[in-house]
Amino acid sequence: MAAACPLPGTPDLPALRAKLQGLLSFLRGALAISSAHTVDFYTESVWQALVDLPPESVLAALRKATTEAEAGDSLPLGEAEAGSGFTDLPRIFCETSQKLLSVEAFALTAKHYSVQNLGLCTPIEQLLTALQVNKKQRIDENVKAIEFMNTKKSHEVQAMSELICSIADYCGLKQIIDVGSGKGYLSSFLSLKYGLNVYGIDSSNTNTHGAKERNRKLKKHWNLHHSQSRADTNGLALKMPKELKVPEGVKCKGDAESVQRSRLGNQDLSADAMPEFSGSAISIIRKQQKNLLAQPAEEENLYFEDAFSLIDFLPVDAIEPTSSQVHNSEKSGLRKERRTTTSKARDSSIYSPLTSFITADSQLHDIIEDLEDCLMVGLHTCGDLAPNTLRIFASKAEVKGVCSVGCCYHLLSEEFENQHKGYAKENWGFPMCHYLKEKRWCCGHNARMSACLSLERVAVGQGLPTESLFYRAVLQNIIKDYYGIGKCEQHVGKIYSKCSSFLEYVRMSLKKLGLDESKVSEETIMDYYEKYKPRMNELEAFNMLKVVLAPCIETLILLDRLCYLKEQEGVAWSALVKLFDPVQSPRCYAVIALKKQCGRS
């Protein structure tokens, strides 16, 4: 067995805390910008209170900064490691008024405190090399994620599934728990392409049923994809012993485990030992296997008495739908019976959608009957589900590794955000680590919302919807002046796309909010529009400031999670990895950790 490469080095806990200290120093002045709500931009004179610079000069400086971001410029590692003293913070913000003074210094500092420039990321290429990825050992290279997925989802699923399979191989794991699995894109791909035993858990029963249906379509596509080989398939069975050579020593069904280990990354059998088993050949075998299962046992023995059992290599059933919220004794009995008869043959590549609401206190044994040592993963786990995934990993002995990509930061619960409301909660979404808890740090909902903005997308021309934001901000002035409502708790929603003018937008919005339209004349509405139109560039410039600052808020959230993992005694290795193209998928960072029992020697 080949020895595993050492995993790439990552910053230790003291180094991460030093970076946090510098980041917090910057955010103490900058957080007010992220925390301001666009809806209140004119009613609360946000520009005058926080910036009060010519908007044209602000936009010019920020456009330069975003152009540099698009070019991928970054600080050298030495500068990135220099700490918080690389720039004079007082020249960014006024010490007395806290107004922004230097846009250039603001943009430079924000860039410095991004994940990439702080030197926090482990290069994905280095990690995959250390995990000893061998592309020749994949089950079927012809399974394409693009089918039934949009371009973004396909990009995410292919990149993440390769990493997950590599981690599973490194740790010797066959069972994957996909939390927040949604419609099962990632789970299906892990099962169909990589032959892993996947449990996809989602809180929505609708998503669970959708995942079952989507997987059915994927299986159908699998068959259709190889329809051009149907003629060869018909004659494959009798020719197989001659044309598809069996590795030496594999003579019966019981020896199939050695081939299975090869597929899972074990170096006992190299990929070269099975040269005929290309992706298309395997798919042909899979189709022929379906036909064989419908035939008498004698005929099956005739075809395969000198070969290993293909059901150990490519199982026919790629999905076993279940739900922790649906208790059907008859189905449960059938499932147990099937598991008894074919557990060894099928447990390596099943996709089982489950419905359950996951919290940090969830008992996995209550959700998964045959729980074993596993890898827990999550692709864009929403809000508190991402930190809860990390807590489950840290507390449950069976979970040997975790690979989590979070999203929807605005839905995180914050321990120090609403203390006056007396919320009783033990496991908050933010902060997780001791350092930020001791600081009693709070971002606030609006700042976390702004963390979801994509600097990379803006840099390549996918700008913010300035006019729709402008419409909403001016509408708020009308609501305040004519209806006496300073803070509107209701959401207008996506009305802008349905309107051809500001006048129509206001009328539709007032109607949706249940306000008397007759209080405001058309002339008055247009007067508001004309009054604020010359100041639209203030709103545009302010939103660009929020976009440039967004990576810093995301860095804070990711650093918090990484520090939490570094604080756990049983965690041997943890890292941040830039997994996706941020233009295609803005939430592109994976938090990865392995326990001490993982890895091969």
Image: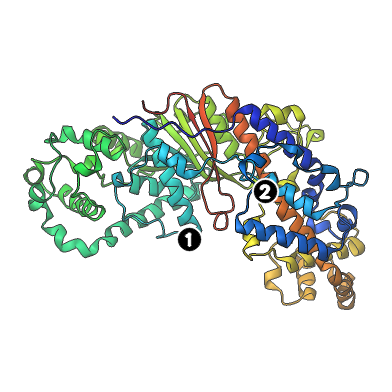
Q: Position of residue 590 (x, y in %)?
A: 54, 42
Looking at the rendered image, the quarter that the C terminus falls into is top left
| Residue at left offset 8%, top offset 42% | 301
Q: Check residue 151 in the rendering and tell me which mark sits there, or answer none.
A: 1
| Residue at left offset 60%, top offset 25% | 567
Q: How is the image coloured?
A: rainbow
Figure check: 399 above or below 521: above
| Residue at left offset 83%, top offset 63% | 55
Residue 351 position by quadrant: top left
Q: Position of residue 507 (x, y in %)?
A: 79, 71
Within 10 Å of the Cα at label 2, are there few (<14), some (14-19), or many (20+) other Cα atoms?
Answer: many
Within 10 Å of the Cα at label 1, are there few (<14), some (14-19), or many (20+) other Cα atoms?
Answer: few
Q: Secondary structure at mark 1?
A: helix
| Residue at left offset 88%, top offset 71% | 528
Q: Position of residue 373 (x, y in %)?
A: 40, 28
Q: Nearer the viewer, residue 600 or 108?
A: 108
Amino acid carrying label 1: it is: Thr
Amino acid carrying label 2: it is: Pro
Q: Is residue 530 visible?
A: yes
Q: Nearer the viewer, residue 389 or 89?
A: 89
Q: Secondary structure at mark 2?
A: helix
Identify residue for label 2. Answer: 551
